[in-house]
Image (cartoon, grey):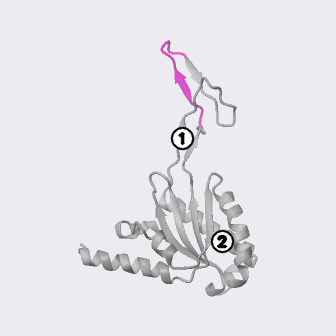
Amino acid sequence: MPTRSDNSLLDWAWSDLFATYPASFAVTLAYNPTLVGTVFPAYRLLGTGERIRLPMPALKARSDVRQLATSLKVSCERIQSDLDRLHRNMDRKLFGARFHKLPTERRTAFMGFIENLETNAHVHLSWRVPGDRLEEFAGQIQGLWLKTTPHGSIRIKPIEDAGWGSYSTKRRPALKDPELFVANRT
């Protein structure tokens, strides 16, 4: 069992890792798991036993019928899988179909933490991008994320100081659950 001083040392190590990682961009990817409407037909049961079908999200809702809020659960495995797909698609856009043959230091790389898995799943990433591809990366990532996760959202900002390292490790999630730490696997 880690002691209090061990936890302080681990806190410092995570913050230091993020502060010194040679990242170009701070990227926050969100899943936006609560949607208005439901993907399955929903019914209201009346006192008489009659069922009334509620409108689907694609249909214009009437003021006298409310749609159900749907909460989508997002697992750590799905997030890592989506990040793998996003990373692969980004490197393919930046470097072409044979991107995997490039040395890893010439490709993009990321590491980060998953936060609020149960309520508002999102990931804070530090993303390293080769200097000659910064503009292209910034122009492509939003479209690639929304293609991967249509209801998602993204914030991207160039990293100019160590503040992002402190912010992205503010909850020290990996101390409680190492599954919450994510990094590129290719």
Secondary structure type for disc 2: helix
Residue 120 visible (yes or no): yes
Point out the residue furthest to the right here: 96
Q: Image quadrant for the N terminus?
A: bottom left
Place residue 102 in its image quadrant.
Answer: bottom right
Q: Residue sitting at 67 percent across and 83 percent down? A: 130
Instruction: Give x and y (percent) for residue 182.
Output: 50, 70
Between circles 2 and 1, the one closer to the viewer is 1
* Residue tagged 2: 88
Residue range (magenta): 40-50
Q: Main secondary structure of the magenta part?
A: loop
Place residue 137 in its image quadrant.
Answer: bottom right
Place residue 28 in its image quadrant.
Answer: bottom right
Q: 35 left or right of 146?
A: left
* Residue tagged 1: 70
Q: Image quadrant for the C terminus?
A: bottom right
Q: Amino acid at mark 1?
A: Thr
Is 61 rendered above or below residue 13? above
Mark 2 or 1 closer to N-term? 1
